[in-house]
Image (cartoon, rainbow, N blue to C red):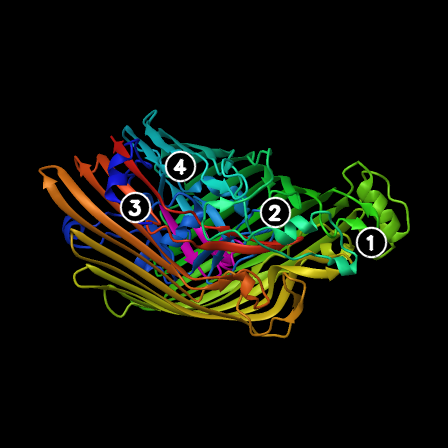
Amino acid sequence: MMIRSTIFASTALAIAQAAYAQTPPLEAEPTAAEAKTGIPDIVVTARKQSERVNDVPMSITAATGDTLIRQGVTQIADLQKITPGFAFQPSQYGNPIYNLRGVGNLGDSISAAPAVSIYMDQAPIPFSVMAQGTTFDVERVEVLKGPQGTLFGQNSTGGAINFIANKPTRTFATGLGLTGGNYGTANIRGYVSGPLTDTLAARVAIAIDKRGNWQRSLTRPDDRLGQRSFWAGRFLLDWTPSDTVRFSLNVNGWLDDSDSQAAQFLFYNPTVPPANGGYTDLVPSLSTFPTAPKNARIADWDPNRSFSRKDRFFQSTFRAEFNVTDSITINSITAYAKFDRNFPIDPDGTPFTNLLMNVFGDIESISQEVRISGQFAESRIKWMLGGNYQHDKSHNQNRFALNATNSGVGPFRFTNAIGDASENVKTKGIFGSLDFKITDNLTLQGSARYTKSDNDFNGCLQDPGDGALARAFSVAFNHPVAPGACVTLNAANGQSERIFSSLNEDNVSWRGGLDWEPAPGTLLYGNVTRGFKAGVYQNPPAIFSFTLAPAPQEELLAYEVGFKQTLLNRTLQLNGAAFYYDYKNKQTNGYIPSAFGLIPGQVSVPKASIRGAELSVLWQPVRALTVNLGGAYVNSKVDSTFFAADPLGRNVDVNGEVLPTTPKWTATADIEYRFPVGERTEAYLGVSPRYKSKSVAAFGNDPTFAIPGYTLLDLRAGVEFDDGRWRAEVFGRNVTDKFYLVTVTRLVDTVNRLTGMPATYGATLSFRY
């Protein structure tokens, strides 16, 4: 349904997304002539040094904080709006999975190391579930594509996302923004920044997101779900006691009390068919329950239950920088992060308790990086040496309430179970890089990292204390299991017990590259990169010990050639790249057959490949018009015989299949036209379409788990007063109310899907001083 202008007009002006600050640039600003007639530069730290983005020989999508605000990027998943080749899919247990160029890790444990690493001011946010509060009050975001393990750690096989926070300013600055929209949306963004002394400056920023219920029960039309309640804050302190010494402190955190999204029911498919002994008294209800309509708002869930999560995150980062000489600098980054999860999920899409989950967990992480960098030979040689240490401790507990075909052994039924797992991971690394300017126009780069990782794991499927699960498995395994004890059968000794395991790995990742500047504004480059992602454990309902076996580290060898071309007096920027990935032991969430039906587990695909190309166009023929276009082609394929159970329980050879969550085509666009409407007032109109071709949610080539392609359209219109110090805007997201899917899953006895958001609209007003 198209959003009409009358709806925009009637929307209460409750004011707007984050007002943004203009902080001092890292390098010299463009000249006055360039600012008027050319595309301004974005300075990035993709190689842990300040460089203009068009001078960096790798594929990067960089966007300013103001761009994120204008295009409605309020969560990391929204980076799909500006980054071709980037995809998002939640795991079966609600964890966010980010995917770049077909590389991602579809794991269910909150402590599963991501393949796309996330950083705030170069400090790691170690796990994807921690990264919600990164997108507000930022100077810019840098999406680095391809393996980044030599400088950003072993797990960046897909890429790295680096958020740069707005820094304390040297003069007083403040801003406030409010947003109002449909579904009772009311958001607040604000900051205060300025000097405390001649050498000390601080900044405080907040973000508050509120929204009412947007989902409606299929069977209880008056029952609603989908509230959002998110609070985030950040405190930054910069101290510069001298010209050669700088310290900064970043303390941030967030609280998320939002409802988890309810699933849409597709059809009943029992894990253990009745003919094979499966039993649940819900069979008549599940087998006749209607398929959800193609309406994003319609879903179903168990009545009279709260699905409000209680997720909490805190992080502190201390950074010190010392200029030893004019050409040698030492950097130290110390970070501590703590995350707690209480996340209820109803994944079966029905009002019956076929499966109800509550994911509990906590993660504590400390990290330390020290690096020294410099240059010599009249800056023809730039070098860096460093080391890092990270210690992650996690506990993940999945509590299941179920009435399913696999929830019993003969007449011995159980309705509750606990999947419990802990990990203790220590990672050490040393790294270095060297850039050698062979001639004024030709530069050779190399970097490498040695990493050693030690992971101690223990976990099991546990009786919750009522004894029903223990009694059932006492019969199944023919030995006594006490109430509250682990029921997982250890294949090594035939006993039900907690399973202990260790995974000790090391690797050497490296990058070699050559870039050539044949003329000003032209950069040609080629890179070969080898990256690794650490092995991972899963936390499934482990009936047998083999389902807790880890997937070993994966390896990616990437080849990339590209260009960056500035044309037409800096009014046109063309960037392109072509790449080929040789992928070994790809980790993914799969299904392992057992006597109790399919059991989720981590599997490794021996060999896969990814071929692709990207192109971006930024054109500003006149100051009034900006056209930003991007497209990516990603062709992924399994290249080896590998038999795996698909979500419906069939053992299939996935050789030749595409990788899950990897659309072949993605495209983004943003077109904005600005025009004066007064002496100090400017109006603008913006349109932002994006396209994603079809993909699959799981291996098996079953059309049930296909995710159809779709096109979404966002619109905006606004005015700015006093050189942008005041801004008013009306906006619409997904204005055509397109029905589209985020993922399709099968857990226990039902096949279900999660949908994207329907049309949303609102009005904003913000100011900065």
Q: CA distance from mark 4 to mark 1?
A: 50 Å
Q: Is tag 2's residue or tag 4's residue first in the polypeptide sequence?
A: 2
> Mark 3: which amino acid?
Ile
Q: State the image quarter where residue 724 is shown.
A: top left
Q: State the image quarter where residue 619 is shown.
A: bottom left
Label 2 sits on residue: 111
> Mark 1: which amino acid?
Asn
> Would you place residue 411 above or below residue 636 in this image?
above
Q: CA distance from mark 1 to mark 2?
A: 23 Å
User: Foreground residue, 634 or 761?
Assistant: 761
Q: Is tag 2's residue or tag 3's residue first in the polypeptide sequence?
A: 3
Label 1 sits on residue: 490
Residue name at image x 35 percent, y 59 percent? 56
Among all residues in the image, which is located at the extreme right? 479
* Range drawn in magenta: 140-161
Q: State left or right for residue 174 relative to residue 741.
A: left
The picture places residue 354, in percent across and down from the top left corner, at 67, 46
Residue 143 within the magenta-colored segment of the rendering: yes
Label 3 sits on residue: 3
Residue name at image x 46 percent, y 56 percent? 87
Label 3: which secondary element: loop
As drawn, the label of residue 183 is: 4
Label 4: which secondary element: helix
Q: CA distance from mark 3 to mark 1?
A: 58 Å
How many C-alpha atoms fall within 10 Å of the one at disc 4: few (<14), some, or many (≥20)?
some
Q: Is tag 4's residue or tag 1's residue first in the polypeptide sequence?
A: 4
The picture places residue 202, in percent across and down from the top left corner, at 37, 29
Q: CA distance from mark 2 to mark 3?
A: 41 Å
Label 1: which secondary element: strand
Of tags 4 and 1, which is closer to the observer? 4
Of tags 2 and 3, which is closer to the observer? 3
Q: Is tag 3's residue or tag 1's residue first in the polypeptide sequence?
A: 3
